[in-house]
Amino acid sequence: MRERITGLLMVMCLVAVPVAQAQQRPMDWSTGHKWGAAAAVSSILLDCGSTLVLLNDPNMVERNPLLGRRPSDVRVIATCAAGTAVTLGLAHIIGPKRRGWVLGAITVIELTMFVLNVTE
């Protein structure tokens, strides 16, 4: 279990470092946008972490069609890393006017999935 969470955190850090370095250039990421990105990535981590924990339950069935009914740890971690990269990339490309909305929407969706994972 600990290995799963450690693997997930390592992959997320590998994705986050290039994004953080890109943000060090003079770009149009405000402090609020950076906090929004942190919230979105944190909510993705919560959702992925809860999915990894629930994989120990033989009765658990994943509802995300991208993962399949019984995903492997590697598939969950890879999907979470890809989701993080797409979220941050889209937020960067879409520009400052809509960035907050995109990051907020991702945060709400991921937190909803986390709550559904935990309550079932």
Image (tube, helix red, strand yellow):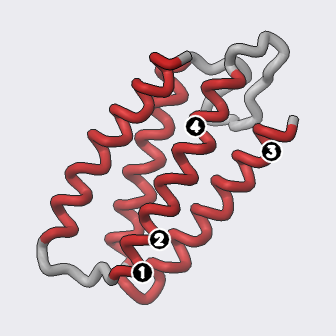
Find numbered disc 2 in the image and state the secondary structure of the residue it sits on.
Answer: helix
Dot placed on the residue nearer the N-terminal end, 3 or 4: 4
Marks 1 and 2 in Cβ contact (< 8 Å): yes
User: Disc 4 designates what residue?
Assistant: 48
What amino acid is found at the position of numbered circle 3 in the picture?
Leu
Residue 116 - label: 3
Q: Is residue 29 depicted above or below 65 in this figure?
A: below
User: Disc 2 designates what residue?
Assistant: 36
What amino acid is found at the position of numbered circle 1 in the picture?
Gly
Dot placed on the residue nearer the N-terminal end, 1 or 3: 1
Answer with left or right where residue 37 lies relative to residue 115.
left
Q: Residues within 10 Å of mark 1 (few under 14, many from 20)?
A: few
Q: Position of residue 118 (x, y in %)?
A: 78, 38
Q: Is residue 45 depicted above or below 107 in this figure?
A: above
Dot placed on the residue nearer the N-terminal end, 3 or 2: 2
Find numbered disc 3 in the image and state the secondary structure of the residue it sits on.
Answer: helix
Answer with left or right where residue 36 lies relative to residue 116.
left
Q: Position of residue 55 (x, y in %)?
A: 68, 19
Measure the C-alpha gap from mark 3 to mark 4: 12 Å
